[in-house]
Amino acid sequence: MRRLFFGLEIPAHIKARLLKARAEVSGARWQSAEQMHLTLLFLGDLEEECLPAVCEAARHIRPVPFELSVTGLGCFGPPSAPRVLWAGVRPEVPVASLHGAIKSKMDGLGFTTEGRAFRPHITLSRFRRQPGSVESLLADYEGREFGVFQVDEFVLFESRQGAEGSVYTVIERFP
C-alpha cells in the first residue's frame, strides 16, 4: 500500500518566508520546509497496482498555467483553540479548477475521494491537545503576502511516516 496525494510544490523562497511566521504557540507542531505543499487531492492508501492507472489518468489533465499568491494566515477550528494553522492562496478559482479536474479523473477510476469542500491552503502547523491561541499571529499576518509563483505543473506525492513526521516523495510530475 502507498499513501498518495496530488499537490503543488511551494518554491523555496516562499517556504523561507513562511518559516519566519513561526511563533511560540502552545501545542504547535510546525511543518518543516520539506513538508510544505498545497494538497490538491488526497487519495489515501492505494495498492501498488493502482499507480499506473492513476498516473495515466493524471497525464491527460492539462492545467492552464496561472500565478498563485501565498497570502495571509488562517486556521481550522477557532483561533483560540486551532487544529491547523495555514497560509492562504489567491486566487482560489484556478486551484479549485485543477482540484476539480483531478478529482473528476480519480472518481472516474472508481476511487473514493474526500467529499468535503476543497479549501486550498498550505499547512504550517498542526496542534496537539491544549492548543494555544493564534489570534495575535493571525492579526499580525492578515493580508501579508509571502510571495507569488507560477503554477504550470502538479505532482503526485507519496507520504510516509518518518521519525520527524511525514516525509513526502515525488512520484511523478504532470505538466
Image (cartoon, rainbow, N blue to C red):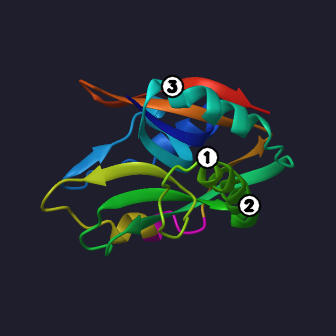
Residue 115 on image: x %, y %: 48, 66
Amino acid at circle 2: Ser
- Residue 145 is labelled as none
Q: What segment carries the magenta color?
A: 139-143
> What label sits on residue 97 in the rendered view?
2
Label 3 crowd (10 A; few <14 / some 14-19 / many >=20): few
User: Is there CB contact under 8 Å for labels 3 and 2?
Assistant: no
- Please name the residue that numbered disc 3 is placed on: 49
Asked whether residue 140 is drawn in magenta, I would say yes
**Sequence order check, earlier mark of 1 and 2:** 2
Crowd rating for badge 2 (residues with CA inside 10 Å; few <14, some 14–19, many 20+): some
Question: On screen, 170 above or below 79?
Answer: above
User: Dot 1 corresponds to which residue?
Assistant: 109
- Amino acid at circle 3: Glu
Residue ID at (54%, 65%): 119
Q: Nearer the viewer, residue 111 or 76?
A: 111
**Picture coordinates of residue 130, whole percent (x, y):** 12, 62
Image quadrant where one finds the C terminus: top right
Q: Nearer the viewer, mark 1 or mark 2?
A: 1
x and y percentages locating residue 64 in the rendered image: 87, 49
The answer to whether residue 134 is left or right of residue 159 is left
For the point 56% across and 25% down, the residue is 170
